[in-house]
Image: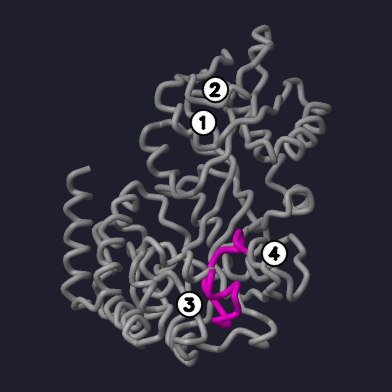
Amino acid sequence: MIKKLSLAVSTALLFANPAMAADNIVVGVEKQYVTYFTELAEQFNKTHDVKVEVTATSMFDLMSALPTQKGNIADLFMIPNDRIGELADQYLIAPTNVTINGYTTAATEASKYNGETYMVPMSTDTTLFLYNKKMMNAAPKTLKELPPSDWAAKFTDFYFTGGLFMTNGGYIFKDNNPEDIGLSNAGSIKAAKAAQSLYDSGVNHWTLMQDDTVAFDIMMKYFTEGKVKAIINGPWTIADIEKAGIDVGAAPIPSWDGSHPYKALTGTKGMAINGYSDQKETAQAFLAYLATPEHAQKWYSMTREVSPSLSVNYAEGSLHKAIFDATNIGQPMPNIPEFMKVWGPMKTALAQIAQGQDAQAVLDAAVETIQFDIEDM
């Protein structure tokens, strides 16, 4: 494989060694992962006739360059699971032919498309129930039992609200079938009305959060100032929360009313094979070497990112255990290309729901738009 790169890719991925052997492979990952992959590559190289080289690049820059790179880019790279279908349909990634065992069901499902595995899962995250330990001892059994004045969530954003739909009996695509959309069924209408009950409560922060453009900032402000006891947010916000002096606890998001679990939308990142690579067998061998309990534990130890491997040990009561538990029961973001058509119409619908419009009419309109946009793909 000739190692030249599209200009869209970070210059860190430009190689100064054009005389590399033809059977070498290149792993392109974000800067913070280079040390981890370099250690594994050095170990792999000792027992194989090929050489694995690791270089730093932006994941999203690399994916943007894939349609025009024709193989002149890394053989292995990291992708988010919700891009798998789109990239696979364009033959820009290849099936791994690696059996992935010992991962959460959510991560295993997230890595597959049309019955084939396209990714070895590396890290996973989702939203959590974050609470002020000085104001609340533990997460409640249900969200419905919390007074609206006690908590906040950005329910004008489908990333945060998807789980609210599922905990009331809604769904996005049944069994990943884009022809079966459950975003206006009875459960989804129940979820919309649950959200409306919060916005209609007269509580100041919920009124302010009807405006999606300021909802996130309002939520964080009220929580970091101790004006609410809990929020629904991602683990990536915990550093800022702790800087504000909040002793924060974390738990999987409780069910709305106990009728269904809260399946928060869950994202998984993993390693995929370049569809244009002429070293697929070597790439597959490296992925098989990577996909072990030992290397999952090393990943967590070195990166502090939560691995979806069932073999990794997380301390009880820790943030990382809460993330793992939440992702284990979460809803993997669908990896079919049609999922990209959900975000826009649902953003519009959720804004209208927050403003008190009829839930049935709003969701029917959103689903109709999603169906039209999918047909127009």
Mark in front: 3 vs 4: 4
Q: Which residue is at a point 36% across and 88% down the rendered structure image? A: 201
Mark pair 3, 4: CA separation: 20 Å
Please name the amino acid that badge 3 sits on: Ala
Q: Residues within 10 Å of mark 4 (few under 14, many from 20)?
A: few
Rendered image quadrant of residue 334: bottom left
Q: Which mark is residue 73?
A: 2
Please name the amino acid that badge 1 sits on: Leu
Q: Is 282 on the left or on the right of 144, as rendered?
A: right
In the figure, 21 relative to 320: above or below?
above
Question: Marks 4 and 3: in contact by CB < 8 Å?
Answer: no
Q: Nearer the viewer, residue 152 or 143?
A: 152
Mark pair 2, 1: CA separation: 8 Å
Mark in front: 4 vs 2: 4
**SS of the residue under disc 3:** strand
Question: Which residue is under mark 4?
Answer: 243
Mark in front: 1 vs 4: 4
